[in-house]
């Protein structure tokens, strides 16, 4: 059983996180002081140390240095409400495995802990001349259908190159996952992958976010800051929803991509950067170019190769495979053992249009697993909106109403309530129609 030490001067937060992790079968200890944490680390081995950044006695950065010097086998995760790229870079350079900003969800911290444990076990295997643990992205189900295989082929094709790739697809289709796969299959895999949400970058702070700034460069610049370009040096800078960048930011971004040099705000020094650019959008950037909201030269700079990520409704042959993948993942996270989906739930999942794509499916399956009191997911655990809008919910187009009713009853094992819900009618109406059709 893996052991975790949580170090945070917020006692309430510390104990809440301890309770959650203990329910996930971890051995958890807590410390409200980094001085005390040093003593605990020196007397007992912990697989993972989760430490806050800002504490009254010794800061988290110093604690990371101490832990990696005394027990390098321990993986350290930095927690802070003062998230910034510079802090992330500093903590990782000191030896932290990863960086998470408060507030964070339970799934987020659990995923990070599992990745850290896999990384530690992979390092142990390498020391014993055994193949390292599989990279985290490879855990994801990629699909076996025609469109899924085409997507994988494009990833394999572009990964070894330095080309900028524009990843296009609807929201929730997994564009960032595609970017991470390209990164992890490239020769830059051991270097940083820095993701930037372009929609959240304000016009006034864009230069600082991308290029960093020197202390005193503007009001509020109380310390030096490393920008995204410098943080990603040697690796990949992923520009998510790049179509949301304002026009003036597009100008300076294009210049940085052309010259491969950046200048932090308030500084006279130029910094050479070796960064591969991957960008993603759910917009039609060609149309944005035509109406003048996106620069044509930047579009061509980003779009040296385009990958279109298909919507989930277009990957029908893989749909239930994805559902099973998310079911297994939810079982692990929630400590359950749901075996699968009954015929009625399978029918509805296959006919739902999934406007939110893989993200929506993941959330739907996780919710269903949480609600389920049986060993399979049924119609009762799925949102009613999933079957209310199924126009021809019982099979072949243009079949008679009596045949639709018979098919719905067959799918639901003669459960009248479920059949009525599938048909989007009430039970009284169903009984009346069954009488009419002598069913």
Image (cartoon, rainbow, N blue to C red):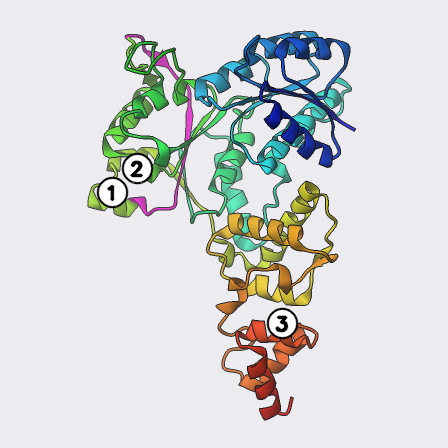
Front position among marks 2 and 3? 3
Relative horizontal placement of residue 42, taking residue 314 as reference (left or right): right
Q: Is residue 275 magenta?
A: yes
State the residue at coordinates (24%, 36%): 295
Q: Do the numbered discs 1 and 2 sit on residues whose CB atoms are within 8 Å?
A: yes
**On screen, 434 above or below 40?**
below
How many C-alpha atoms fall within 10 Å of the one at disc 2: few (<14), some, or many (≥20)?
Answer: some
Tag of residue 299 = 2
Q: Nearer the viewer, residue 108 or 273?
A: 108
**On screen, 45 above or below 425?**
above
The total number of labels drawn is 3
Write down the region rendered in magenta: 268-285
Q: Report the residue marked by disc 3.
A: 418
Residue 245, percent across and down?
Answer: 30, 35
How many C-alpha atoms fall within 10 Å of the one at disc 3: few (<14), some, or many (≥20)?
Answer: many
Say what secondary structure mark 1 lies in. Answer: helix
State the residue at coordinates (68%, 43%): 334
């Amino acid at each position: 059983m893996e052991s975790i030490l949580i170090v945070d001067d917020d006692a309430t937060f510390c104990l809440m996180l301890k309770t959650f992790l203990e329910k996930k079968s971890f051995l958890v200890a807590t410390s409200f002081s980094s001085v005390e944490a040093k003593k605990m680390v020196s007397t007992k081995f912990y697989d993972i140390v989760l430490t806050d950044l800002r504490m009254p006695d010794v800061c988290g950065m110093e604690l990371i240095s101490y832990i990696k010097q005394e027990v390098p086998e321990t993986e350290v995760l930095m927690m802070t409400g003062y998230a910034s790229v510079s802090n992330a870079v500093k903590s990782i350079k000191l030896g932290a495995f990863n960086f998470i900003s408060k507030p964070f969800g339970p799934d987020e911290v659990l995923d990070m802990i599992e990745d850290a444990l896999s990384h530690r076990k992979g390092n142990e295997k390498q020391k014993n001349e055994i193949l390292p643990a599989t990279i985290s992205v490879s855990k994801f189900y990629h699909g076996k259908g025609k469109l899924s295989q085409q997507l994988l082929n494009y990833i394999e094709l572009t990964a070894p190159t330095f080309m900028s790739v524009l990843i296009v697809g609807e929201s929730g289709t997994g564009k960032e996952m595609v970017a991470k796969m390209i990164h992890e299959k490239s020769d830059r895999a051991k270097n940083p992958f820095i993701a930037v949400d372009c929609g959240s970058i304000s016009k006034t702070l864009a230069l600082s976010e991308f290029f960093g700034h020197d202390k005193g460069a503007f009001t509020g610049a109380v310390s030096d800051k490393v920008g995204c370009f410098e943080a990603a040096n040697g690796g990949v800078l992923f520009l998510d929803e790049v179509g949301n960048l304002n026009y003036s930011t597009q100008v300076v971004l294009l210049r940085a991509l052309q010259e491969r040099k950046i200048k932090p705000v308030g500084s006279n020094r130029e910094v050479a950067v070796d960064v591969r650019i991957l960008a993603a959008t759910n917009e039609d950037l060609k149309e944005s170019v035509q109406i003048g909201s996106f620069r044509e030269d930047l579009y061509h700079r980003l779009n040296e190769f385009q990958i279109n990520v298909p919507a989930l409704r277009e990957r029908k042959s893989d749909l239930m495979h994805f559902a099973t993948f998310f079911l297994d993942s939810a079982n692990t996270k929630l400590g359950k053992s749901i075996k699968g989906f009954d015929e009625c739930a399978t029918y509805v999942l296959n006919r739902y249009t999934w406007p939110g794509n893989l993200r929506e499916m993941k959330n739907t399956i996780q919710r269903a697993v949480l609600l389920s009191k049986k060993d399979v997911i049924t119609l009762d655990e799925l949102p009613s909106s999933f079957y209310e809008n199924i126009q021809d919910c019982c099979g072949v187009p243009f079949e008679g109403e009596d045949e639709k009713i018979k098919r719905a009853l067959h799918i639901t094992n003669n459960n009248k309530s479920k059949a009525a819900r599938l048909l989007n009618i009430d039970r009284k109406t169903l009984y009346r129609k069954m009488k009419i059709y002598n069913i």
